[in-house]
Amino acid sequence: MSKRAYLSEASKWWNLARQREALSDVLREEQNETVYVASLAVLAERDSQLTAVLDALAARGSVLPEIGLEAWKEAWRRSRLERAALRGAKVSANRRKAKSQAGVDRIKDRWKLSTKEHPTKSLLVEAGVSRNTIKAVLGFTREEYQARYQAALKRRTRKVSST
């Protein structure tokens, strides 16, 4: 019995639809062989299609080692769960970002003011976020933010006094 491998390497021009088409053309040949696949996605998109592929292989005396409908269904189920988990992770990340943004917005007007008047620790507690989160949201450390604010005040003062 000969052996044949079908490797799945998706690209713009060699997508899964073309790979399945090529595989179905080869399956029309009359010969006994052992068929190996790197990805079950090459075989079928739905369980009914996989059943048809397995029947075609059996009709021509070919085998697909250690792969059957149950294994395919399990792999399909796992991939769906992983995608669902990814979608859930994205929703959770968006919620955390929104919560962080709301916390930063609560203290943003005081973050640039004097540390003596508005201690960093008390602002962080009020915002409910870490110093690193504030830096990530605002793009600057508190010291950089204060320096930029002071520079802007000086520019405004010079502009007002020159007019």
Image (spheres, helix red, strand yellow):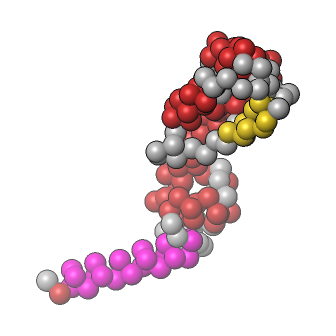
Q: Which one is nearer the viewer's eye here, 96 or 117?
A: 96
Please report the residue visible at 21 percent of the width from the left and 80 percent of the height from the top.
Answer: 160
| Left or right for 72, reference 53 | right
- What residue occupies the far left of the structure in this picture? 163
- Name above or below for residue 97 compared with residue 109: above
Please report the residue visible at 70 percent of the width from the left and 31 percent of the height from the top.
Answer: 40
- Name above or below for residue 70 compared with residue 142: above
Residue 149 is one of the magenta-drawn residues: yes
User: Where in the figure is residue 124, as x and y percent of width and height?
Assistant: 64, 58
The image quarter in which residue 157 lies: bottom left
The image quarter in which residue 87 lies: top right
Residue 89 seen in render? no
Q: Read off the magenta span.
A: 141-161
Please report the residue visible at 73 percent of the width from the left and 38 percent of the height from the top.
Answer: 4
Q: Main secondary structure of the magenta part?
A: helix
User: Where in the figure is residue 68, as x and y percent of width and height?
Assistant: 80, 20
